[in-house]
Amino acid sequence: MNEKIRRIGVLTGGGDCPGLNAVIRAIVKTAHNDYDLEVIGFVDGYEGLIENRYRRIDLGEASGILAQGGTILGTSNRADPFRFPVLQDEEYIYLDRSSQAVRNFESLGLDVLITIGGDGTMAASSGMMKKGLPIVGVPKTIDNDLFGTEVTFGFDSACVTATEAIDKIHTTAQSHHRVMIVEVMGRYAGWLALCSGLAGGGDIVLMPEFPYDIEAVCDAIRTRNARGKNFSIVVVGEGAKPIGGSMTVARTIETSPDAIRLGGVSHTVASQIEGLTNIECRVTILGHLLRGGSPSAFDRILATRYGVEAVHMAVRGETGRMVGLQNQQMVSVPIEDVAGKTRVITPGHPLLKVAQSMGVCLGVSTSVSLEEHFKDPVAS
């Protein structure tokens, strides 16, 4: 044990998701039970560290939050310490507040900061490490797109929610003989679309990694109709795009480190299908519904494992690293290897093979493999 460790800071950054409170609970309980450490929680992510807004989290506050969605600390996806938005004369200017964050950390007598978040939080953490902060990262995102770990907590819960929605959509699709399009989050990665599509029995799954051929999509629908299946379920990742086209941007938020907000591609897909098949389509966009609710049993356990291991890493002095899951074991990976990267689905991924064996259309012609299709620079 590192005898110098006495006080740990913790913050939750980026979008919320089920399991954040389970991590906080695990950090507090492990810090208290194994090492008799004090835990200081920063309010609203890096914004709290910059503005010195914090509170002590004791065992009492950490009790009873395992099944609670969201985060008791609050979060922010706009608080980049190196580009912090400040409203001045009705316009936002951007300031480097990283040195202030370091001063606040030091003034509180903290030894380690545990940051819980996705790629944006890890990118900010990588920068703050260069400013001298000892940081341990915990991977969080419903998108499951973070390097260094096989799965992020929050993903399974979102997948369960999406699957339940697809299950319910089936009955309406069958009753009205329609094409039902379900749009899920995931940004630039298709993990949520693929996994919920498989679990929910989707007939067509469109992902950001593989630009879709609308003719192939319509052929799949026509083939189903010819077999007597007079409805189809299309699961679309929000970052999906047609061959030769671009992603659908719902809006941009200048004050956010990741200004682009995707969404609405399902309406484009619906219009294209109706125009080519004359079959009525309906769209359901799950959106932020996927972030809410109680974490699944899998996520509760995974989040707890991450929180426990993060404290152990902090005490061992393994800072500058993020805890991850590889081959069902807890591992630590350099945060610098995680920051600024997106873990996407590659053409040879086993789940894609499973989907194709099940007859799921992935938006490309069934006459060629995904590998062959995306050798074409026009397609990719």
Image: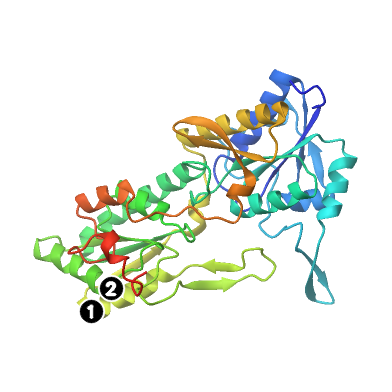
Q: Residues within 10 Å of mark 1 (few under 14, many from 20)?
A: few
Closer to us: 323 or 27: 323
Give the x, y percent position of residue 130: 76, 49
- The residue under the point 72% across, 53% down is 127
Locate the N terminus and report the quarter of the image it occupies: top right
Give the x, y percent position of residue 227: 9, 61
Label at residue 21? none
Label at residue 276? 1
Locate the C terminus and report the quarter of the image it occupies: bottom left
Q: Is residue 170 visible?
A: yes
| First of labels 2, 1 by sequence position | 2
Distance of mark 2 from mark 1, alpha carbons? 9 Å
Q: Secondary structure at mark 1?
A: helix
Q: Residues within 10 Å of mark 2 (few under 14, many from 20)?
A: some
Q: How many marks?
A: 2
Q: Amino acid at mark 1?
A: Leu
Label at residue 214? 2
Direction from residue 253 to residue 160 in the image, left or right: left
Residue 364, quarter of the rendered image: bottom left
Q: Answer above or below: position of 3 versus 27.
A: above
| Nearest-to-viewer mark from 2 and 1 | 2
Give the x, y percent position of residue 308: 62, 28
Q: Amino acid at mark 2?
A: Ile
Direction from residue 311 to residue 9 in the image, left or right: right
- The residue under the point 82% across, 36% down is 110
